[in-house]
Amino acid sequence: MKGSDKAVEFFRGKLRFFQHRKHKISVDLVLFIASLGGVRRSSKVVDIGAGFGFLSLTLAKKYGCRVTALERDKEMLELLVKNIELNGLEGLVDVVECDIRKVDECLGGGKYDLAMANPPF
């Protein structure tokens, strides 16, 4: 795994993340979370291409909503699961190994209140 050896703390230590060496948390992700509206505890969210889980975990922690995190990259999946466990969010964030080209198949026709994706750069 090409993740960092030390967890990075965010939001005054409320969340911690192991990041991939090539994919780091950036200000655009923080601004994205800050600009979201209408998310509630009862919301069902899908994060398409969740990476190591910054958006998924932050939403689950901030709102207490259920998040389905879709990711296809094995290294990112490993970090995603590790970050969910590190933050005690196993009951709120579900991981699905999935390629975006098969999203309908992976979600099995489920309904979500919010779909989000952080485009790769």
Image (cartoon, rainbow, N blue to C red):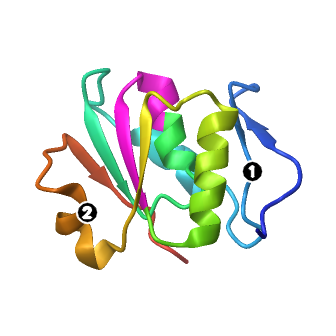
Neighbourhood count class around disc 2 (C-alpha, 10 Å): few under 14, some 14–19, many 20 upward: some
Q: Is residue 26 visible?
A: no
Q: Which mark is residue 87?
A: none
Residue pictured at 53% horizontal, 39% vertical: 57
Q: Tell me if I can see residue 75 in this picture.
A: yes
* Residue 26 x %, y %: 65, 57
Disc 1 residue type (three-letter): Phe
Residue 67, above or below 43: below
Q: Is residue 111 left or right of residue 107?
A: left
Q: Nearer the viewer, mark 1 or mark 2?
A: 2
Q: Position of residue 41 (x, y in %)?
A: 32, 20
Classed neighbour count for the residue bearing mark 1: other residues with Cα under 10 Å, few (<14), some (14–19), many (≥20): many
Secondary structure, mark 1, is loop
Residue 36 highlighted magenta (yes or no) = no
Q: Residue shown at 88%/48% (left/top)?
A: 6
Residues under labels 1 and 2: Cα distance? Answer: 26 Å
> Which residues are drawn in magenta?
59-70
Q: Residue at x 37, y 40 (%)?
A: 67
Q: Which residue is mark 2?
A: 106
Circle 1 sits on which residue? 18
